[in-house]
């Protein structure tokens, strides 16, 4: 009902699309589905050992999995093999459920400044506002109630869901922003003073790379003097706070409700679990993994996995947790 | 000024409405009021021992309380007795301050798709958008700047405050959503990959029971394949994150800034205090109570009360807290 | 591009504007800039010892700093001296980048109720809604997609960024609200009950002093019976939750993602670090400083600095942290 589905496809054709090996042909795949509800014509994915029983109990259907898990295929379930099952499953799902495409329609109820430059085949919905000198790339969709501020630039093939507010931002291609996100407002910068705090004008912007995704009701402040930078491929979840001058390297994964304070610099492919807090002015190396709810108060070298508040290397944190639990049992 | 108030009512009539016992009649009640400001004609409520002094120092007025607290009534304060004082107070307040009722007016400045089915006596305000094939039940109010997505269904007697964005959702009756909540956007689902993360199409929806309340700027993602489910009577506070495939049983109470990760299943009447984090794929039993700021990394059996990060039974957590404090005093 | 800049100014004139001492004249200042990029004509600020090297390595330009740091001026960098460098820098930045001023234009696409009273020289943008009997002070800017509810009052010289939703609120002058903030919705008040929770009508309002700043997607609930109160000069960051009946004294600084539960009372100039949680009904004294991620479960006397969850005096918390780390190394 909510989604439009493509027609069934032969398993050998789908295997080619998703780059997986299959030892069957001539069978129709009708849809993707969850592993605990595999049926004839349905293709699922095994990529989390927590759901092993769902696979071994399945009676029929197709399953994408690693070759090393082949022995888990029982009954009439047919395997499709690949080293990256979840990615392949994503491709299968994308075959059946294509991404929204621009209709090319500009609503008469949108308010678009004459100086704005709108690319080819853009969709701009009712009550969206595009302000002066904004630039929107080709095939981009701006949904209802979005605001694109003066001089903002958004690349091509992007999608801004309803109610996104973007000001003082330069963004790349294939940007996807979920509803209610606020990007580009001034940061929390002021001189604290009993005469009344004195605001420091925030004159940087937000620069966003290509293929970035930003979550619902997330807030990203613009830089105070330098810019706030979001690298290519970053995935930012809902209700995340990214303060002024923060820099995220390429591929960072920032889970819901994380807060990153001003001027912190994260390397490439840093993963921050839910509700993590990162103090201001820290440097977090490439590939650092941060457990949920951790609080970072110091720089972290590349490759480290850390946990706790204050955060420490996770092996130490495990020891610490055990020691504390032992202590309370004395 | 902000609220329209009903006319005064005799105490014996009000007692009947709120289902409480009173040993007085012929006296007029003019308004509800806080316990620390009881006066003639004002009715308050005693339900939190923290405010005992406010009651014992009151000179006059009416107070709803448990019969066992009768001895706290001093001076000319008149008691109304019930086993559930706060509920009775709610009813009294509701007598004086009725819920907003639909005016039945559809603004000419709303953008409603011709295929949408709008019930009887709905109020839809300026700059609200109702997209194709959406269904809105009778007497429902959709305030300014809301977006109701394609095929969304909302039951009767509901109220969506300003700026609510709801897509891919099927909701029951008497839904109340506070401003800025985002419901139904795709979840945080992708294959992590140094070639660039690969998004998994999110093709479930959000199913919401009857009598649910959702807080301001809260985010509820739709299911990835299964649905995200919010049971009847659930109360969800502001700035809460509910990820894809989460299931809340009936009557759950989720306090502000809680984050519930993907595919976690909560039983009935689970209470999660402020800023709690619940990891993905966990099962939390009926009636579990979770102290504020706790971090859940394991399943929790029904009826347990837990605290801490990582969360443990609260009796152990108290011991642990004491042991740690002792340790630091050595 | 995003910001309009004033013309260059002689250093002695700028020194007078920002109330700093300088021992030079006739040199032009063209812009403010970050300390790590000082150049001829650019003025920076030294106020964080973390960036000492940036100052000592700078070749030329101007730097605002304390007189006691004079020895850090190397090469051709010219100092401007003041006891409060960051405030002075703010003034310099404000010289070059003036605050947005109202254009005095009321968009034809705004929906303004005839009973609303709009001050002189207000700017109200497209798709903003101003409801019945609302009052807006002189020179105030209401950006696109804001909603100003019935009877709301906003003072003069205020700025509400895009998508702000304000109901049941009385606000002072020079209010600044960042995008997406929701102010004045009903609080999380209900009687918990297995028959279905029973909502308590929330009949207070939000009262906001002068010179207050409220962050993006922050939520401030109105009072249940008393009012929610935000004192003068308060600075509230993004994604903060302020529950019903909370009172903030003058000058409080509430960093991102803090949650303050119902009826908590904070004194003057309380500073709460990021992700702090404050339980309901607590009293926090004047000048209390709360470290990031702390969880407050008890009243805190004036002047105390606290940390941890549950929060304790910070000197004890440091001892505790060290003791725990020692423990895990045994």
Image: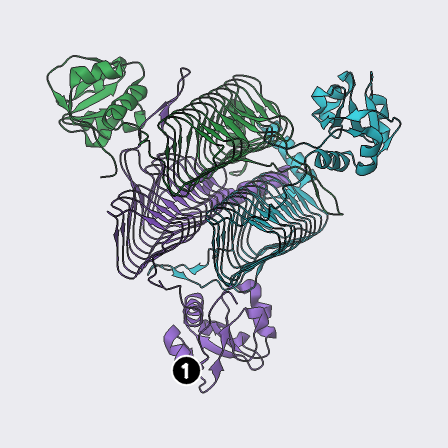
Chain colours: A cyan, B green, C purple
- Residue B91 located left or right of residue A309: left
In this rendering, the answer to whether B99 lies above or below A150 is: above
Q: Where is residue A269 in the image (x, y as percent from the top left)?
A: 70, 48
**x, y percentage for residue A262?**
54, 55
Q: How crowded is mark 1: few (under 14 residues within 10 Å), some or many (20 or more)?
A: some
**Residue positioned most to the front:** B114
The number of callouts visible is 1
Q: Quadrant of the N terminus of chain A?
A: top right
Residue B222 visible here: yes
Query: B34 or B95: nearer the eye?
Result: B95
Residue A160, position in %: x, y? 56, 47
Question: What x and y, as percent, mark residue B17?
Answer: 24, 16
The quarter of the picture where residue B65 lies is top left
Q: In this view, does B83 lie to the left or right of A160?
A: left
Chain letter for the residue marked with disc 1 in the picture = C
Q: Is residue C19 among what the camera can see?
A: no
User: Is disc 1 placed on a helix, strand or loop?
Assistant: helix
Q: Which residue is drawn at 43% across and 51% down?
A: C162
Taking the spot 73% from the left edge, 29% from the top edge, the residue there is A48
Say above or below: C276 vs C1: above
The furthest residue to the left = B26
- On the image, numbered disc 1 is attached to which residue? C12
Q: Which of B320 and B173 is in front in this view?
A: B173
Side of B310 where A180 appears, left or right: left
Q: Residue at x 12, y 15 (%)?
A: B25
Q: In which quarter of the image is residue A161?
A: top right
């Amino acid at each position: 009902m909510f989604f439009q589905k493509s027609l069934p496809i032969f398993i050998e054709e789908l295997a080619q699309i998703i780059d997986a090996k299959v030892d069957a042909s001539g069978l129709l795949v009708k849809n993707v589905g969850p592993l605990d509800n595999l049926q004839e014509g349905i293709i699922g994915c095994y990529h989390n050992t927590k759901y092993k029983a769902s696979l071994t109990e399945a009676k029929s259907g197709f399953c994408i999995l690693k070759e090393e898990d082949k022995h888990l295929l029982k009954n009439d379930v047919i395997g499709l093999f690949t080293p990256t099952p979840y990615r392949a499953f994503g491709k299968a799902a994308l075959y059946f459920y294509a991404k929204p495409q621009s209709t090319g329609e500009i609503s008469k109820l949108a308010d678009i400044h004459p100086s704005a430059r709108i690319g080819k085949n853009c969709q701009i919905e009712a009550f969206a506002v595009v302000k002066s000198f904004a630039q929107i790339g080709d095939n981009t969709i701006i949904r209802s109630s979005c605001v694109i501020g003066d001089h903002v630039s958004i690349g091509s093939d992007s999608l801004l869901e309803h109610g996104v507010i973007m000001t003082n931002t330069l963004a790349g291609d294939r940007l996807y922003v979920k509803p209610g996100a606020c990007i580009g407002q001034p940061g929390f910068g002021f001189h604290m003073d009993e005469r009344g705090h004195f605001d420091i004008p925030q004159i940087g912007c937000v620069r966003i790379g290509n293929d970035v995704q930003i979550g619902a009701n997330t807030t990203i402040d613009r830089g105070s003097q330098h810019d706030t930078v979001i690298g290519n491929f970053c995935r930012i979840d809902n209700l995340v706070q990214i303060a002024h001058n923060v820099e995220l390297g390429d591929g960072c994964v920032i889970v819901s409700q994380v807060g990153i304070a001003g001027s912190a610099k994260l390397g490439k492919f840093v993963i921050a679990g839910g509700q993590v807090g990162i103090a201001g002015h820290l440097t977090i190396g490439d590939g650092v993994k941060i457990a949920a709810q951790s609080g970072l108060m110091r720089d972290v070298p590349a490759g480290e996995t850390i946990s706790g508040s204050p955060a420490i290397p996770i092996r130490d944190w495990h020891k610490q947790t055990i020691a504390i639990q032992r202590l309370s049992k004395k």
